[in-house]
Image (tube, rainbow, N blue to C red):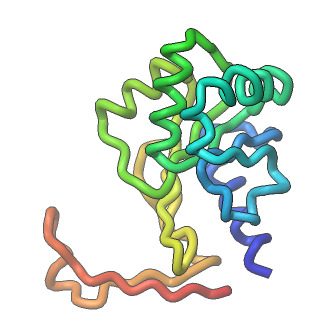
Amino acid sequence: VQELPRRGVVLLAMHYSRFAKKKPVLVLGMTDNRAVEPMGKNVSGASIESEKFSKEVFYPLLRSRRPSTILGTTSYILRLAHHLKKDQINIPLHGLIYTGERLSEKDHDELKKVFKCPIGSMYATKECGTVGIMCREGKYHCLPFLNYVEIVDPRFCKQNRDATVLQTTKW
């Protein structure tokens, strides 16, 4: 039951981030997320650190499957960019979606140089799933059909202030 909404959220993230909803999707570093398995190939992020694996398995996989989008954790996407740049491999993408960690402006610029495609994000927690999706303007939006997000104490809602946020998942 939970897998269908999660898969739908990935498709929404692709839409809101200006990506075509095309398969296959390469999922990088999220091997425990069964919800995205039907969308494409799921590769362990740690495996791309092996030069032998990259040259004998991973790069040929990229060439044969030709993923339209890469969905993965920020750290593994950054490592992939490093390896592709080092090995002078170019993979044309429709989009890149990062999740799990913040992406600095410097790293965002580096990913833009390496992948030459739109970059989007999903903000999620392991306990509750996706909280928000980045839109075309680079702002995050909550998903009211999946969860209810509320500021518990609105006195702390001033810019650059900490606040207590409560998320209730609907599924």
Q: Position of residue 155 (x, y in %)?
A: 15, 84
Q: Is residue 154 or residue 147 the one in the foreground? A: 147
In the rendered image, which quarter contains the N terminus? bottom right
Rendered image quadrant of residue 54: top right
- Above or below, 107 relative to 1: above
Residue at x 68%, y 30% (from the top left corner): 53
Q: Toward the viewer: 21 or 96?
A: 96
Image point 41% across, 52% down: which residue? 139
Q: Position of residue 40 (x, y in %)?
A: 81, 46
- On the rendered image, what quadrant is the C terminus found in? bottom right
Residue 93 in the figure: left or right of residue 143: right
Residue 47 position in % (x across, y down): 62, 40
Against 145, residue 67 (above or below) is above
Quarter of the figure with residue 17: top right
Question: Where is residue 95 shown, x and y percent of the image?
Answer: 62, 34
In this image, 40 relative to 166: left or right?
A: right
Total labels drawn? 0
Residue 56 sits above or below residue 137 on the image: above
Residue located 60% across and 24% down the image: 51
Q: Is residue 135 visible?
A: no
Left or right: residue 31 compared with residue 160: right
- What residue is drawn where x is 68% and y is 37%? 69
Quarter holding residue 165: bottom left
Q: Which is more toward the observer, 80 or 18?
A: 80
Q: Is residue 140 above or below residue 150?
A: above
